[in-house]
Image (cartoon, grey):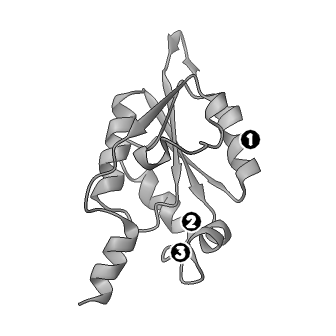
Amino acid sequence: MELGRFILKTGFVNGCFDILHVGHIRMLKFAKSQCDYLTVGIDSDSRVKELKGSTRPFNSHEDRKEMLLALRDVDDVFIFDSSQELIDLIKTASPDIMIVGSDYKDKEVIGAEYARQLFFFERVRGYSTSRVTQSIGNR
């Protein structure tokens, strides 16, 4: 991305970000430390429901987008509804770096071919949306 005469290093992260937790925050901080401009792609409500089950998402994609945009490490947020829309988003963004969770090391990373570099972020042990919701349910 070019801003005046400065060339910015761009980054891309995607996910559900349904209930923000420390693991999300640390990944976004790491991603931003690797670039000047960080774009986040989030799954639409219907896609989260398809991927995570009928009880999800807990927060609408508009609410999730607003919460992410309130974080200093996030510069832009886009909502996608399919794998093809995610590919198109990454292709358009053409990021210098793409950051995904380490659980994707042996899996296909959608759109990775449109990023110049792929980083794997080591998941933060003990933090996941499933774990947060389970903890709430146990109280």
Viewed as shown, does residue 21 lie left or right of 6?
left
Which tag, 3 or 2, sits closer to the chain's start? 3
Q: Which mark is nearer the camera, 2 or 1?
A: 1
Name the residue that disc number 1 marks: 88
Viewed as shown, does residue 75 lie left or right of 47?
left
Q: Amino acid type of disc 1?
A: Asp
Q: Is residue 65 above or below residue 89?
A: below
The answer to which of 50 and 108 lies nearer the viewer is: 108
* Quadrant in the picture for the N terminus: top right
Report how far apart the C-alphas of labels 2 and 1 lie in the structure: 20 Å
Secondary structure category for the residue under label 2: helix
Secondary structure category for the residue under label 1: helix
Residue 72 makes an appearance in the image: no
Q: Are marks 1 and 3 in contact (CB under 8 Å)?
A: no
Secondary structure category for the residue under label 3: loop
Q: Give the farthest residue toward the front.
A: 106
Name the residue that disc number 2 marks: 62
